[in-house]
Each structure stands twice: as C-alpha cells, then as structure tokens.
Image: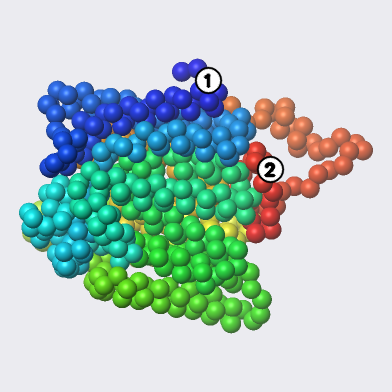
Amino acid sequence: MGTLSAVGYRRLGAVGSVAVAVGGIAAGRLPARDPWGIWVPHGSATTAAAAVLAYLGLTLLVVSWWRYGRLVARGAAGGVRETLVTLVWWAAPLVLAPPLHSADVYSYIAQGAMVVEGHDVYTSGPSVLGPDELGADAAASSGSHWTDTPAPYGPVFLVLAKGVVLATGGQIVPAVLGMRLIALAALALTVWATLRIARAHGARETGALWLGALNPLLLIHVVGGMHNDGLMIALMLTGVVCALGGRWVLGSAVVALAMMVKSPAAVALLFIGALVVRRTSGPLPWRVVKAFAVPVLVAGAVAVATTLLSGTGFGWLRTQSVAGTIHTALSASSDIGLGAGELTHLLFGWDPQPVKRAFQTLGLALALAAIGYAALATFRRVRPWRGVPPLHPVHALGVALLALVALSPMVQPWYFLWGMAAISATAWNGRIGRVLTVLSAALVYETHPSGSTPWYGFYIAGGVCVLGAVLLWRERRADSPSPAARLRRTAGPASGSVRQPSAPVGLPSTGASADGAKRTTSAR
C-alpha cells in the first residue's frame, strides 16, 4: 500500500469502520430475541460472509490507524482538530451497529433491570429475571459465563444501567443504543482528559489522541462492544486531571466514582497521593500521611455515599473476585497455574484447582509489588541504573495498571486500555507506547465479531505481533541518523556557535509538539 495523506488514511479507516459495522449486522453479537426485528439471525452462509467482511474492515481500520500514527510521529497529520475529525469518522459507523465482539452489554442491561425489579445483583445473576420482567430479552442474550454470575460492578454503573432500562422500558435495541450513548460520553470525556494531561506533561497532543482515543482496540471494545471499562477510564483520567490542577479532594472523589464502576481504578488513588507529596511543602512525614490519608478517606466517603444512595447494597465488596473464576487464555498466571495443576494431577493425583489458584494468587502478589515499586519510583531513584529521574506519577500509574493487567487471573484484550490511557498522555511514542501500539493492532483480532474467542484469533494476533514488531524496528532504523550524522552530532557545534541546552533527562521522547504544547516543570 502506497503512502497516503492523513486525509487519505482517515477515509480508508472510515471505509473499514463501515465494513465492521455492516458485517456486524449479521456476524455481531445479536440478541436472542428482538421484538423489533432489526437485529435478527441470518443464514450460516450470510453470517460467514459478514464475518469475513467485518475482519477485512477491521484490517483496513488497523492499517489506517498504524499509518496515521507514522504521520503523527513525523508531524504530518495536522493538529488536534484534524485528529478529532478522524476520530468522529471512524467511530460514527459503529454507533448504530449491534454489539460487536462481546455480549457483555446484555448482562449490563439485565443487571440494570434486576435493580429495577428489586433483585439483588450481588447474589444472583440475570437468570433470575422472569419472562414478564424488564430485561428478560437481555438476560436471555447474556453470555453463558454471566447468566448466573453476580455483578462485580459498583453501584454507580448499576444506577446508570438502571436509568437506561427505565428510559427504554427494557426493550433490547433501544437499551443497547442507550448503553452506547454512555460509551460515547465516556469516549468524549477520555479525549478531554487525555488532552489536558498531555498538555500538562508536555507531550504531543495528537500522539496522545492517536494512541489513547483513535486506537482500534478502544473503538471496537468501548464504542462497538460498550464495555464499562471505557467509563472507568474516563472518570479515572478526569480525577487525575483534577489532581494535576491541585484539586486533590475533587480528584479523589472522581476517582472514587470510577471505582464504583470498576474497582481497578482504585490504583489511581496511590498516584494522586504521589502528586500530593510532590506538589506540597512541609516535613516529609506529614506530606506522606496527608498524601495517602486524604485520597483514601475521600474515596471511602464517596463509596459509602454512592452505595447508600443507589440502594444496591454493599455486596460489591464480596463480588470483586467473581471474574477470576473465568479462565482466559491471555492470563499468564492462570495459564501457568492450569498447566502446573494438570501436571501435578498426572504425577501425584492432586486436585489441579488449588495449584491454579496458588499461581493466580502469586500473580496478584507480584502485581501488588509492581504497583508499589512504580509508586516508590515517583519519589526516589530506586531503579538499578543511574541518571534516570523519578517517574512522573501519571506515567507510573499507567505502568502500574499494565502490570496489574498482565499479572491478573483474568485478562481480556480491552483491559490493556486501563494503563494505555495514562501512557498515551505521557509517552505515546516511548518504549512502552510502542509495545502498546503492537498489542493494540494484534489484540483486536483475538475476539470474533460475535464475541467468541476462536482458536484462529490467537494465531492472527500472534502474527500481527511479529509483523508489528518488525515494522516498528524497520521504521525506527529508517528514521535513525546515518553514521556521518551521528559523528557530526558527537563532534558538537561548530566554532563560534551557541550550544542549545538539552532537554531535561528522563522526559519521554515524544518529539516536538505539533500542537504548540510546551514542556512544563510538571513533566520533570
């Protein structure tokens, strides 16, 4: 494929997005019953052809996004406005599509209906809904894993789902579109927060938007699949923006709202505390106590208040581990534990489940250690090499969330968006950013448009990982200076010239900002 302009890749990506949406009409996750007759099953031949169309469209979208990012890196993609226009072009075709690559939205709607009907979502699954109750069609359409599984989500999200059910009468198509409006609002809030953080950090705003919002992994799983991770990320980043502006209490409260959607957002409180320590004066012990007491107390108060106001009860405290009972092949700790458990069963006749749980627990312990290490790295030079300043708390938050995902007992492709949101705003073109670029291009293939995880999806994803790594290596090699240029750079400025000060050590190598953003002392 020849090199196109930014507008050319915008159009090509829009064609891909349209193909994904059109293919999803037959190959997406259709409801079990649709009284409106809009999202209904088709014949096997039509469904197979639609899946091929959706995969081709997805490939066009990924290629367009990748090439658009290379233009962003060279400063040839225009400014923020042009990138936002591209985002609208790529997201718009997915708005009216049926659920794509996941059935989770049906369980969201069913759980909202359970709240309306007076069922306890923290002790029962959607299967308790009777055929004449609101959300019955959504309950019948939920994925098999969630039919009898209590909700692991907080009361804030359940209240939003309840509102959608009440506004739509629980009718399946309007309810899905209502949940998509929430996803679109989350996307808009994520864009706003990403731009604010990138501007404060001195990173290139278009690059931050490219990795953090224009990303196919986000478009497919937040706009197309309507995962509530998008809302958690949006609220978490908004809380971080407030903290960066010196409003620690408000930031902690907003992060608490994110926790009341999904609990992993609680990690952000630790790094808001790091910001408090870095930005306040006084004796260090008092600053540390203030830094961690204030966010935790504020978040606890908000959690209690929202739980009491929602009327859903405190059952969310005991259902946080239910997702870990579902085995996903992307979880290294679960895979290793499963293999070790089967091996001990063959050798010694032991029950494999305790062995698997032991490895999952070990993974979580390592994740907690990594989170603590990232937090400590924001205060002092704890890394084993010299000359590297402490991590910025926002960047460290991204690293911590990625470590949590990588070592969790259950890992889904869209979970990587948790840490990617922070990394995109601080070092979108750094080493971690490049790894996330390759993962984003690969992981969209892991799930089928219907939400299943076919075996061939892992092979496609693995192939894309290898191809992406090779392409990045070739691009960086082509962009690196020649030996003669390196020799001239080493020789220093010519006689009589004024040597320009170098950039502060440790800032992410995002390049000069095409949007006019200046590096600030907060990025140090």
Q: Nearer the viewer, residue 199 or 293?
A: 199
Q: Position of residue 187 (x, y in %)?
A: 43, 47
Q: Nearer the viewer, residue 156 or 263?
A: 156
Amino acid on which the number 2 mark rests in the picture: Gly
* Mark 2, residue position: 516
Residue at position x 63%, y 69% in the image: 279
Above/below status of 46 relative to 219 = above
Numbered-mark total = 2
Query: In this view, which residue lies farthest toward the top?
Result: 2
Q: Is residue 57 left or right of residue 63?
A: left
User: Which mark is nearer the camera, 1 or 2?
Assistant: 2
Whether residue 334 is visible, yes or no, is no
Residue at position x 45%, y 78% in the image: 297
Q: Quadrant of the C terminus?
A: bottom right
Amino acid on which the number 1 mark rests in the picture: Thr
Above/below status of 93 relative to 305 = above
Q: Nearer the viewer, residue 169 or 330?
A: 169
Q: In the rendered structure, find residue 3 and report the number of the disc placed on it.
A: 1
Q: Residues within 10 Å of mark 1 (few under 14, many from 20)?
A: few
Q: CA distance from mark 1 to mark 2?
A: 26 Å
Q: Quadrant of residue 287?
A: bottom right
Residue at position x 72%, y 29% in the image: 485
Q: Position of residue 422 (x, y in %)?
A: 49, 53
Choose the circle earlier in sequence order: 1 or 2. Answer: 1
- SS assignment at label 2: loop
Whether residue 218 is visible, yes or no, is yes
Q: Residues within 10 Å of mark 2 (few under 14, many from 20)?
A: few
Residue at position x 36%, y 33% in the image: 93
Q: Position of residue 199 (x, y in %)?
A: 62, 51
Q: Is residue 495 left or right of residue 455?
A: right
Above/below status of 510 relative to 320 = above
